[in-house]
Amino acid sequence: MGLSDALLNSDKKDMIVDDCCTMIEKQVASKSGLSGIALKTAFATLKGVKPGYIPYVVEQILPQCFTAIDPIWNEGLQKGDPVEHLITSSDRTADALLSVTDERAKKAKRPIVRGTYEKFRGSAKQHVEEAVPEFAKVISKYAN
């Protein structure tokens, strides 16, 4: 059974989506400097696409995200600590997650969404790697 089956086909789904949205908000808020201002502006733009847009997108992509990181999580289970393994494999974890968002962005119907993603894609891996520890903890919170 993969993470998606274990976590999203249950009564935990809404809580996971909420925790992921909170994690994203915290990650964006923690950014500073000019790039942080640009990222916060872009995030505000995406939030303004329509009410509830960010939770909607998170809910839509979580199954693919969990499927993408399943191999890394399973390696961690075999080693005894899947959370720590995701964190120590943050490079691979970020690549797996970004493969999902890359596909989603290609299919985005709203030009503002696609354009915003493309503008920040170059720096996305660093931001995703920085978020991996908190994302791993969210997964662990509900996987047990």
Image (spheres, grey):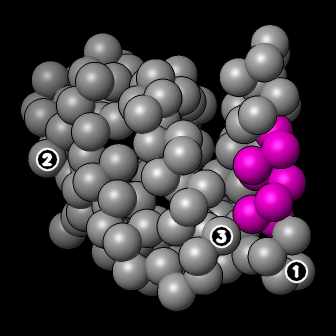
> Which stretch did the figure color magenta?
40-47
What residue is drawn where x is 61% and y is 68%? 113
The quarter of the rendered structure image containing the N terminus is: bottom left
Which percent across, then down, holds residue 91? 28, 24
Which is more toward the observer, 69 or 120? 120
Q: Which mark is residue 71?
A: 2
What residue is drawn where x is 80% and y is 13%? 33
Q: Residues within 10 Å of mark 1 (few under 14, many from 20)?
A: few
Residue wearing tag 1 = 51
Q: Residues within 10 Å of mark 3 (few under 14, many from 20)?
A: some
Q: Amino acid at mark 3?
A: Ile
Closest to the camera, between mark 3 and mark 1, is: 3
Which is more toward the observer, 16 or 58? 58
Secondary structure under tag 2 reads helix
Which is more toward the observer, 129 or 111? 111
Cβ atoms at labels 2 and 3 below 8 Å apart: no
Q: Amino acid at mark 1?
A: Pro
Asked whether residue 82 appears in the rendered view, the answer is no
Q: How many marks?
A: 3
- The answer to whether residue 4 is above or below residue 96 is below
Q: Residues within 10 Å of mark 2 (few under 14, many from 20)?
A: some
Q: Amino acid at mark 2?
A: Pro
Secondary structure under tag 1 reads loop
